[in-house]
Image (cartoon, rainbow, N blue to C red):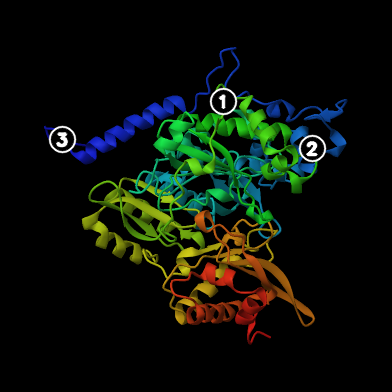
Amino acid sequence: MNDQAGPFSDAQKEYLEGYAAGLRLRELLPFVGERGDGRITSTPGDGAANLAAPLDGEETAFGIPIDELTREERFKLEENPLDIWDKILRHAAAGTPPEGGDVFRFKFHGLFYVAPTQDSLMLRVRVPANEIAARQMRALAGIAKRWGNGQAHVTTRGNIQIREIAPGDIVNVLMALSDAGLTSRGAGADNVRNITATPTSGLDPAELYDVRPLAKGLQFYLSNNRDLFGLPRKFNVAFDTGGSVSVVSDTNDIGFQAVRIDEAKGAARGFAAGVCFRVLLGGITGHGFFAEDAGIVVPPEECVAVAAAMIRVFAALGDRTDRKKARLRHLIDRVGLDAYLAAVEDKLAFPLRRLPPDMGSRPRAVIRHGHVGAYTQKQPGLSYVGVAVPVGRLTVAQMSKLAELAEERGSGALRLTVWQNVILPDIEDGDLGAVRRRVKAMGLDTSASAASAGLVACTGNTGCKFALSDTKRHALEIRRALDRAVTLDGPVNIHLTGCPNSCAQHYVGDIGLLGAQVAAGSETVEGYTVLLGGGFGREQALAREIASGVPADALPGALCRLLKTYLARRETGESFAAFAQRHEVGDLRAMLLDGVS
């Protein structure tokens, strides 16, 4: 607070202008409005009405014969997962975990019963726009300490998970979460997952737009519209500032990518110069698809309405008979992009604006590991500090100390990244040394090697029944081996995922590792399929499979040899991804497996 008389400083004026703009956006964003004919802008679908429809005597739901629906769809029809609070109370009172269809329904409340890997529940907390207040981080530390296993994990959607919660404690946990102003509602199962935003939104000097109000506006809209729950499958939405740090928007079902409309080109098509969002649709890299440009641009004030309409069309038309085909990409492939956009437009009070991709600015090249280390903010005299969090795992002590540091040296807020790291914004430049030392004292670091800064791992088989390998342990073993043996002078992203669901997005890593069971004589051991040469954004590429069945204990040495070979044979300025893409699969396999028995 400014106690001194006199005019505001430039920094204070910028803050007030941004705050006022945020208020104006909040007036617009959650509001959908009406057409001239009285129809609301983003017409609610019939999803909520079809959930928990009585099965007796009913022949169809969503226009589909009930006996053709998937098991999960029948669970939703038998009992609406949003209406099971009494059941959650009963389970907590009895200290018993959910069973049968309730295992699925509990996920609507962010509660995952993870048996048989652990006889307990995992809580997934929503962190819209990847921004969390220090007091909220401290509250999560308290939940993890009192009712969890003393730690929390930053996920690949930039939110928080707390594990090993006893069934008898689930009500206490959800109430404590609410007290902190947080929610886990819709954090799992067939819902819109955590809505991500570039973690440096509002900080990056190169950004085109601060997207935090958009992500938070969409979350607020979702929370107040029941028909946007209970989708055919999960759904991912990301907002990208168009700045120096990526949120990997092209891996989402919907990616809003900020671009600047060229004045001359835009005028020729009736567009005013300024910032709009190109819309990318249909990303599911686990199935080998990036989101593709839909040929439309959306001004900021229309983004929430457009997203809601797109989700509602998916809810109405998405496949509810086959879980493998129940994503937005498959719907668009089935009905065609033009038909999908026409259905979306029918739910809006305004037309969608068509504009070819070449009519706006091209996405800039990002700083590959710009989420770790100290970087100058657009606010004079301030920097943000990215903290490397090995495989996203934080102890409660580290969580509390990061919250304390954010309050004492920053603005009382933290950012979480899809790379499983944490950012401390608004650090005065003169405090950078002290912040680095305090982070180091926590057992964390504000710098990382070119490999470990981009090391991402899913939960793995210690906490997920689908995973075939202990991804987090193996990631740390790879990190130690590379830090000892290889000195990289450019970023390399290594993604470990335990199963084909690809929570860690192994297809977009420079090195992608997919968990597998490997035959070793008469036994089987944990291992990986190795893929190389993935990328995203301007370097978009799907990694190619190089080798399968590589035992986990052989991987650290194999990757060290591969990266040493890259350093010895690369062309001037050549990235690892470009090196991998330039070589044949057989050559890369030889570089990787030479000497592996």
Give the residue at mark 1. 351
Tell me the residue at 71%/25% (across/down). 49
Amino acid type at image mark 1: Pro
| Disc 2 target residue | 74
Q: Which mark is residue 3?
A: 3
Q: Residues within 10 Å of mark 1 (few under 14, many from 20)?
A: few
- Callout 2: 10 Å neighbours few (<14), some, many (20+)? many
- Image coords of residue 214 (percent x, y): 46, 36
Q: Residue at x 71, y 46 (%)?
A: 103
- The answer to whether any part of residue 14 appears in the image is yes
- Using the numbered discs, state the Cα–Cα distance from disc 1 to disc 2 in whole angstroms: 36 Å
What percent of the width, then of the height, locates residue 494? 54, 66
Q: In the rendered structure, which amino acid carries the disc numbered 3?
A: Asp
Q: Please, what secondary structure does the residue beneath circle 1 have?
A: loop
| Nearest to N terminus: mark 3 or mark 2 | 3
Under circle 3, the secondary element is: loop
Q: Are marks 3 and 1 in contact (CB under 8 Å)?
A: no
